[in-house]
């Protein structure tokens, strides 16, 4: 599915039949969120179209970390460090155009590092991990006719996941049910850390994209977990369209909203 098809049919898929609204109501507001207690599995908050699938964008760096460490392509937070190559890698930000290690990859959300990792995995191993993880719709074909699934499928292309599915994936991950115990520990250690309201210590990954190919409707994710006083909660939040403040990237805006509200939502 290419990006134009994705915007009309995939990004707002199953739950609210919003694909037809994509052309008629460019000022739509999309907001969905799940917060779940880790110990009991009790859902503390669920609102919006939480069963609707969206492109994971850079939230996919969390499962990519599991793949990379399990396959021994990544060794620890600082190794390997790969060089940016303008002949091979696409990048616009200055922070992307430098030597990057696994911790910097996650913290700075460097797309080319993800693509260098999946190229080293190869199609068969990459697809095998996505299937093993039960990640979203498991569709890593990429755009039709382009054979780009290995490097593009999670970037507003064929792969899609709902907030409900993001939290289910996090439960399996934090229970260490997916790969080796070492790969789990190393991945969790490089997921970016933040301080949330009410004293919650948060680890999570943003994702930024668009609902439409003209980039008129930004998409933002923030998914992860939060700890306080022996309690842990899991969360997935997605906002898009007019829910994202003008002039801001969707992921950071969604993250800041979640950090402000986590104390209330985790009660």
Image (cartoon, rainbow, N blue to C red):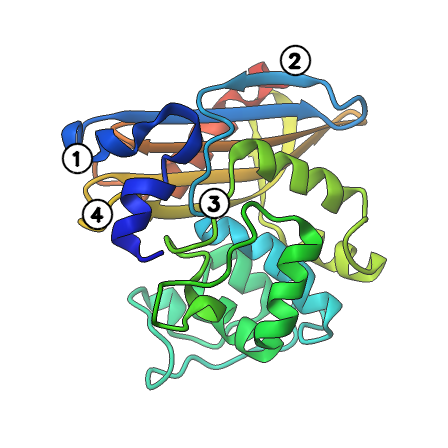
Q: Quadrant of the C terminus?
A: top right
Label 4 close to label 3 by CB (< 8 Å): no
Gap in angstroms between the C-alphas marked 4 and 2? 36 Å
Residue 98, given in percent of the width and then of the height, sits at: 42, 75
Gap in angstroms between the C-alphas marked 1 and 4? 13 Å
Q: Quadrant of the N terminus?
A: bottom left
Residue 233, given in percent of the width and then of the height, sits at: 69, 28
Which of 9 and 64 lies nearest the eye of the viewer? 9
What is the secondary structure assignment of the residue under circle 4?
loop
Q: Is residue 197 above or below residue 138?
A: above
Residue 215, given in percent of the width and then of the height, sits at: 21, 47
Q: Could you tell which of marks 1 and 2 lies nearer the N-terminus? A: 1
Considering every residue shown, the one lying at the far bottom of the view is 87
Q: Could you tell which of marks 4 and 2 lies nearer the N-terminus? A: 4
Q: Could you tell which of marks 3 and 2 lies nearer the N-terminus? A: 3
Q: Left of 126 or right of it: where is 189?
A: right
**Residue named by callout 1:** 23
Q: Is residue 40 above or below residue 153?
A: above
**Residue named by callout 3:** 206
Considering every residue shown, the one lying at the far front of the view is 145
Gap in angstroms between the C-alphas marked 4 and 3? 18 Å
């Amino acid at each position: 599915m290419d990006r134009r098809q994705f915007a009309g049919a995939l990004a707002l898929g199953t739950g609210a039949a919003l694909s037809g609204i994509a052309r008629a109501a460019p000022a739509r507001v999309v907001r969905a969120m799940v917060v779940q207690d880790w110990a009991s599995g009790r859902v503390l908050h669920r609102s919006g179209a939480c069963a609707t699938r969206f492109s994971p964008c850079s939230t996919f760096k969390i499962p990519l970390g599991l793949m990379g460490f399990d396959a021994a392509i990544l060794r620890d937070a600082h190794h390997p460090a790969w060089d940016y190559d303008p002949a091979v890698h696409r990048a616009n930000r200055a922070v992307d155009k430098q030597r990057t290690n696994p911790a910097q990859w996650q913290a700075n959300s460097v797309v080319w590092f993800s693509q260098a990792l999946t190229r080293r995995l190869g199609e068969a191993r990459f697809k095998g991990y996505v299937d093993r993880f039960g990640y979203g719709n498991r569709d890593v074909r990429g755009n039709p006719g382009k054979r780009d699934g290995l490097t593009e499928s999670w970037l507003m292309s064929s792969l899609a996941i709902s907030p409900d599915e993001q939290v289910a994936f996090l439960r399996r991950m934090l229970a260490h049910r997916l790969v080796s115990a070492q790969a789990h520990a190393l991945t969790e250690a490089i997921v970016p850390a933040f301080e949330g309201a009410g004293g919650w210590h948060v680890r999570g990954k943003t994702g930024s994209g668009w609902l439409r190919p003209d980039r008129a409707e930004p998409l933002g994710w923030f998914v992860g977990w939060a700890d306080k006083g022996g309690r842990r909660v899991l969360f997935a939040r997605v906002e898009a369209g007019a829910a994202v403040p003008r002039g801001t990237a969707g992921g950071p805006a969604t993250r800041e909203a979640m950090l402000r509200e986590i104390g209330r939502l985790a009660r």
